[in-house]
Amino acid sequence: MNYEEKKSELEARFKPVSAALKLAYWLEENPDEAPKPAKKAAKKVEPVEEAEE
Amino acid sequence: MAYFTGKDVDVWVTTEHDFDYLEVTNNELVVYAGSSAAGATKRANAIFSGALSMAGLAANRMTDLTGCDVAVGAMDEDMSFFGLRNVGKLEVKKDTSVTLTRKKSDNKNMVAFQGTTNSTHSYSAGAHAARWGLIEDSDGTSGMRVADGTVDPKSTLDDGTPPEQCYGYRVFIELKAESSASAGDGVVLIIPNCTMMEYSSTVANEAANEETFGFSSMVKPILWNGDVDGANGYGLNKGATEQTTAANM
């Protein structure tokens, strides 16, 4: 069972704080299932226009 | 009253919560918020056999058991009727108790009986025993805590949606295991919603140290066929592990 499945299972069954607590313990025992942080979108760099002299 | 030696029976004592159970950490009682499906193995610091979902598995049963004394009875009320010789014996409630004796291989059961409970994991301020099992925190949102005996059994609820009865401990006494998978020909006496009633231990220099502790309940016991759900033990939310309804408390 992956992180999202476990999260939704616990949230359906227990109150929010309990579900979060259980999820934290579950992650401790299943560290490989930890959600990977989302990659930040690369900042678009605008080309600087050189001022015409 | 029936007395079984430790090799005659297998015994599990669990909380009345699907996943959560008690542990002893730094000689204090704390709650472990479990989340695994049925069939999980208890952690090293766990008290008794863990939670309801962990009953029926060999890895979770009570170890070093030397004796199991079961007393089954009922309280009747005698009703006399005008013009009738016989009185009506009307059952008021069951009265079941079990006393377990085991070699004292650790101090966890003693800590369960006399405490102390970690203040963060307590229903009140800590410094009490865990004779009454688990209860949802008084704010209704912070998960399960060690009950301090100030809430009546029927009002002792868990953190589920919807909440269910969670008072005390459940004792499973497997008198006969089923002969093969799904045969359902075993015999298991299940005593729900037990309070931990007494504790004593003996120390001797020429014999093994032993401890004796007891549980008592007035909720109707369950006689079950011992059907083991493969690696899941007695399973979850089945006949053996279904929490008691409010009407039956």
Image (cartoon, grey):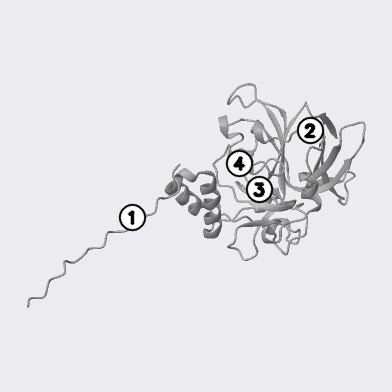
**Mark 3 neighbour density, 10 Å: few (under 14) some (14–19) many (20 or more):** many
Disc 2 with disc 3 on a shared chain: yes
Dot 2 falls on a residue whose secondary structure is strand
Q: CA distance from mark 3 to mark 1?
A: 38 Å
Residue at 56%, 50% (x, y): give it: A25
Along the line of sight, the residue nearer the viewer: B7 or B248: B7
Disc 1 with disc 4 on a shared chain: no
Answer yes or no: is residue A28 visible. yes
**Residue tagged 3:** B21
Q: CA distance from mark 4 to mark 3?
A: 10 Å
Q: Amino acid at mark 3?
A: Tyr
Image height check: is A30 above or below B143?
above
**Residue tagged 4:** B53
From the viewer's perspective, tell me whether residue B15 is left or right of residue B66: left
Instruction: Specify the label residue A39 is tagged with.
Output: 1
Q: Dividing the picture into quarters, in which one does residue B139 lie?
A: bottom right
**Residue tagged 2:** B65
Q: Chain of mark 4?
A: B
Q: Amino acid at mark 2?
A: Leu
Nearest to N terminus: mark 2 or mark 3: 3
Residue at 72%, 50% (x, y): give it: B168
Dot 3 falls on a residue whose secondary structure is strand
Q: Amino acid at mark 1?
A: Lys
Nearest to N terminus: mark 2 or mark 4: 4
Dot 4 falls on a residue whose secondary structure is helix
Along the line of sight, the residue nearer the viewer: B160 or A3: A3
